[in-house]
Amino acid sequence: MQTLELRKLLILALGIFGLAKARAAGTYVKLDYPASTASNELQVAVTYTLWIPEGVKTIRGIIVHQHGAGTTASIEGSTASSDLHWQALAKKWDCALWGSSYHVQNEKIDTSPGASELWFDPRNGSEKTFLKALGEFAARAGHAEIDKVPWALWGHSGGGIWADVMTALHPDRVAAVWMRSGSSLMFLSHPEFTDHSVPAAVYRIPMMTNPGVKEKPKQPAPEPDTRTAAEKMKGPWLGNIATFKEYRAHGGLIGFAPDPLTGHECGDSRYLAIPFLDACLAMRLPDPGSQNQTLKPMDTSKVWLAPLFGDEAKPAADYKGNPAEAVWLPNEAEAKAWMEYVKTGATSDSTPPPAPFDVRVSAKSEAGTEIVWSAEADFESGIGGFIVLRDGQELAKVPEKPVGKFGRPLFQSMTYHDTPSQPMAEMRYLDGSAKSGEKHTYAVITVNGVGLKSAPSLQSP
């Protein structure tokens, strides 16, 4: 136990250091809650970090990016609120970005001491702690509205279970839901995880289930199929399908987007998740400055439908299959992105990113000249990297070799859990070839996730 605790403290320290280096324009507020000893409260410690965009007067919603089960997911979830691409979505809608890190002690997915089910079933105490944190964030951030605004929930694996159950508990607060490789039905094979009632209001909330195709069970179903109902829903693939079918049969506004390239890792799912949530927030958020926080209903006049396990969507009026069994997509733009994603595992982008800004240059004695800048993520494909120019000529690429172990190579390389890797990347370059006393001008170009370049920033000094 001492070795595990020491390892976790070390990695957590590195994570905090990384957050400090990578902060974009905005405010970070962090809350820590110790594990409770009460049986009806959260029995694992948790750290919540909230990012608030710079200059926002009134927060309109909260985008929750919830990691999955296990110690690695907990540690890597600590960087979620510093993700530049997710921050771009939050900023667009004057929303805060919420990242969690539940400090589980082992890899168990049950309710034993230190295990992950203690948090990913909200009824075990994480619901209470989440609601408590909303109030404390409201007070500490000086935004009283945080305690009342709607939520958009993104969850991976156990985080998908958490998002699914939280939606059933608070359907009036949830604007949209993305369940990556996880939903509550997949866990009904565990007897301690009791089924929950699903209010009719849940079926009016736009949702997407998004498992990896490589998560399919290796053994085909027996003939005749003698499995229990719980066995038929066990695992992320079957569970996401079961959730889709159940909600859709009740008229639920839910889609199914299988990722053809991945197993349980998140891959490039963000390139469909972010535009999906964008479309939903556009339709559902209360008007800016409104005292009424009631979510607007989805505009269903723009819906497209597609067959389950198919890859071609059509406007609802032109769809020939059974609508109650069809994949639901909120509009044409999302339907086109969905068709590309289920075939290729990603989406394309034909527009260049915004140019970097606030380029600052400072002499570092004999070490050279340091260039520091700011940039916002390309909304469609994030930031792949940067090109530093000296006197109008390319000087360097940052990073020199982008890393893409999980998904596309990006400036903030992605983990298994759709969060930036540690140590966090910096918008900084040291020109060690610049001689003392030389005068140069510097500019920076952003390269997005598909390789398109921005215009150069304004030159500095």
Image: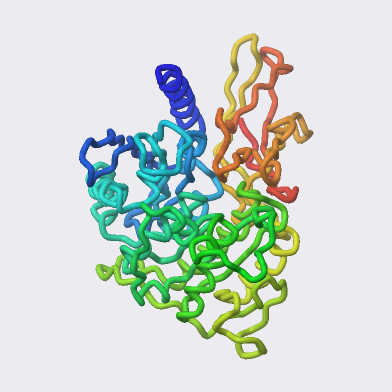
Q: Residue at x 26, y 57 (%)?
A: 145
- Report which quarter residue 427 is drawn in: top right
| Residue 356 rendering spot, x and y as whole percentages | 61, 43
Tell me the quadrant of the picture where the N terminus can be found: top left
Q: Is residue 303 above or below residue 171?
A: below
Q: Is residue 269 left or right of residue 53?
A: right
Q: Is residue 275 left or right of residue 449?
A: left
Question: What's the image's color scheme?
Answer: rainbow
Q: Residue at x 54, y 45 (%)?
A: 84
Q: Residue at x 29, y 68 (%)?
A: 293
| Residue 177 rendering spot, x and y as whole percentages | 46, 62
| Residue 371 rendering spot, x and y as whole percentages | 61, 27
Q: Is residue 405 above or below residue 92?
A: above
Instruction: Note whether residue 91 is visible.
Output: no
| Residue 297 rendering spot, x and y as whole percentages | 40, 78
Instruction: Note whether residue 187 is visible.
Output: yes
Residue in front for this viewpoint, 154 or 214: 214
Q: Is residue 217 left or right of residue 73?
A: right
Please state the total of marks drawn on the protein image: 0
Residue in front for this viewpoint, 329 or 74: 74
Q: Residue at x 36, y 77 (%)?
A: 200
- Report which quarter residue 421 is drawn in: top right
